[in-house]
Amino acid sequence: MADPIIVEPAPEEAPRNNWVPAVGPEGTDFLQTVVPEGSRDGVRDAAVSILSKGAPPTVEEGQETGLVIGYVQSGKTMSFETVAALARDNAFQMVIVVAGTSNPLFEQSTGRLRRDLRLDEPGRERRWAHFPNPGNNDATVQAIRNVLDGWRDAGTPEEFKQTVLITVLKNHRRLRNLRDLVRTVGMGGTPVLIIDDEADQASLNTEVAQGQESTTYRCLMDLRQELPNHTYLQYTATPQAPLLISIIDSLSPNFVQVLDPGEDYAGGQEFFGDNAALARVIPPQDVPTNANPLNEPPESLLEALMVFMVGVTVGIREGRNTGNRSMLVHPSHRTAQHREYYNWVRDIFEEWKRILNLPDADPDRQELIEDFRDAYNDLAGTVGHSLPAFDEIVPSFRFAFNSTRLLEVNAVGGRTPPVDWSSTYGWILVGGQAMDRGFTVEGLTVTYMPRGIGVGNADTIQQRARFFGYKRRYLGFCRVYLEQATLTAFQRYVEHEEDIRGQLSVFQDNGRPLNEWKRAFVLDTALEPCRNNVLAFGFTRGRFSDEWVAPRVVLSSDSVVQANRDTVASFIQGLEFVDDQGHQDRTDTQRHQVCADVPLRDVLERLLIQMRITGTTDSQFHMGLLLQLGKALEDDPDEVCTIYRMSPAERRRRGIDDDGEVTNLFQGAAPVEPRERRGEVYPGDQAIREDDEVTIQIHSLDLTPKSEGRGARTVIMESVPVIAVWVPARLARGWLNQEQPGQVG
């Protein structure tokens, strides 16, 4: 695949970092004990890069906001744990982790931090002082002050200096308590690192359109106000909302780090790209809706359960009672439907167990075994030769069922039940929102999700992809069952995600401030980028397909017009044009010159990117055009196009209105009458194209006032170049472009 087209030229200077972090004993210990050996260098380098762009720990005052982007289930927690460890090595005296919006997620994150930072390991130096959800009470205030005073006292031995680790629920009461606590402690001269996990959820201002501040957002702003020197890191796999909020918002990031997953990671490309065999469509009759209520478990659910249980049986044989294999059933956000699906799965499960306990010659048992053989054959297509023979695993079916547990995961009883992964090998989890975001499903192989896309927010849909993760070694056992609209949404999201990551990687590598990034990216028109209530500014959507794209505003300043003249002249200088074919009775304005098979990459880089477009709407459409053509080159670097010089022998006159908009760029067909002969001599400008190929028309216009009519003699500006581009349907791509007031560049 060719390198992506960069719309804006990158600066030549090296990336700008604020300081150079050192990798000390805490970072080294963490990397050696937690991070897989093959990933250590990459995880370390990314953590150093992230921390180096933040506020230096040596300054009295400074605030930086950064965005760290990973894939879903790709190791973002390991990344921010590494950053936290390095922060301690570099004399950060406090690390705050804003960990989840629910108690299960908070406990999951807090437990993992304690385990990975080895806070409870006997004999280990007390490098951390942990305060989960602290309150503003005398005991806590005194304890934290004592820790911070240890850094200020020159007589404190290095091994006795501790870093305060605070884990706090993303809840306005907990955050308000934390604000009051740090205000009481007094944080002057204290370098602080704040890590906001799942930063696109709940942190952002959901009342920006009303000119107000939502409660959690306000609490985060108040907390930051109490910390004179801190770096705020936003970790997420779905960065759409943080990128599209106003660039003057305190939570708008000014630097970015795009995390690369390890080699064993399987994400959108594996499930919805080349390995399409892993994704299955749930047929419409199996999807519960108001118009299609289900009274019994659908066939596709039975198929998914059988595929899963064959995988569990093989996994138990190979894993020798270590690890986990799990299945996720995610039918809806409504808990009543969870109960229905849970009952179905439980009843099916118990019935299959009963049948497996029948004598080998029993017809019901033989029929069930043959059904499992079909599931086995399905898996054989993706697992390959490593799959043991079916007859070898049949005796283990009963043991596999006895080693698999069912659990309904929701908060019906006021608290989401925890999953004790260590207690058994196989798990079938039935639930909804509780397993949407941040929830880790160990060893997930089969996902059954008849749930639709809802309002179609891209970030929300992607966060349901709990089935991504480090599972390359057992990827062949994985299956994802989705209704058609959701499957299509995931497929389209893959391209969108890679486009954003590619663009932001350029800013990361060049150290450019993120507020200079043009908020423009590929996104299918069926998807919304995020919830609209966090956005202060709207955006333009488009998808050019079998249509001409040309600016409406053609009158610009002398300097802009001259720059565009120079661009066109430089571009056509190296091309060899010939007269186009057509009717002998054509006029000079209907005769053009053509050059075929021009590399699209050259046209994009030397002409279209260089053209200066001044109209607000025109510039947004132009950016969308560049995105579509850039994606076309990623798909086929050898894409070519055809160039026409329109009426080179006689410049055309076109009227413009008071806003500088051309009334009609394209010349019509001739003759017009009689109707049956229309276009016989000249088919009209819009027909001058290659239907299935990008076509460029270069117009040179003398502009006249629209008010003077067709016979206008007053020429406002001569020789104004205008570029029209034909985009064939095969290159259609949805895109989004947001203009932000005050944006640089």
Image (spheres, rainbow, N blue to C red):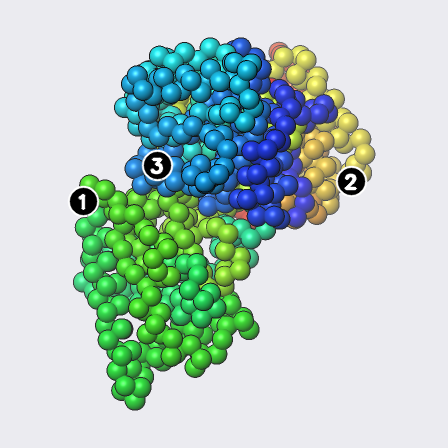
User: Counting other residues with Cα less than 10 Å from the Cα at mark 3, is it few (<14), some (14-19), or many (20 or more)?
Assistant: many
Q: Residue at x 47, y 31 (%)?
A: 126
The one nearer the camera, 683 or 185, is 185
Using the numbered discs, state the Cα–Cα distance from disc 3 to disc 2 in whole angstroms: 69 Å
Q: Quadrant of residue 16?
A: top right
Element carrying mark 3: helix
Q: Earlier in the sequence, mark 3 or mark 1?
A: 3
Q: Residue 381 location in percent, x, y?
A: 50, 70
Using the numbered discs, state the Cα–Cα distance from disc 3 to disc 1 in whole angstroms: 18 Å
Labels in figure, total: 3
Element carrying mark 1: loop
Q: Is residue 27 above or below residue 162?
A: below
The label shown at residue 413 is 1
Judge left or right: residue 230 versus residue 38. Answer: left
Label 2 or label 1, whichever lies nearer to me, is 1
Residue that label 2 marks: 578
Q: Earlier in the sequence, mark 3 or mark 2?
A: 3
Assess whether mark 1 and mark 2 are in contact (beta carbons under 8 angstroms): no
Q: Residue 412 location in percent, x, y?
A: 19, 45
Q: Residue at x 69, y 30 (%)?
A: 607
Q: Earlier in the sequence, mark 2 or mark 1?
A: 1
Residue that label 3 marks: 106
Name the kind of residue labelled 1 in the image: Gly
Q: Residue 664 location in percent, x, y?
A: 54, 27
Name the kind of residue labelled 2 in the image: Val
The one nearer the camera, 597 or 517, is 517
User: Counting other residues with Cα less than 10 Å from the Cα at mark 1, is it few (<14), some (14-19), or many (20 or more)?
Assistant: few
Using the numbered discs, state the Cα–Cα distance from disc 2 to disc 1 in whole angstroms: 78 Å
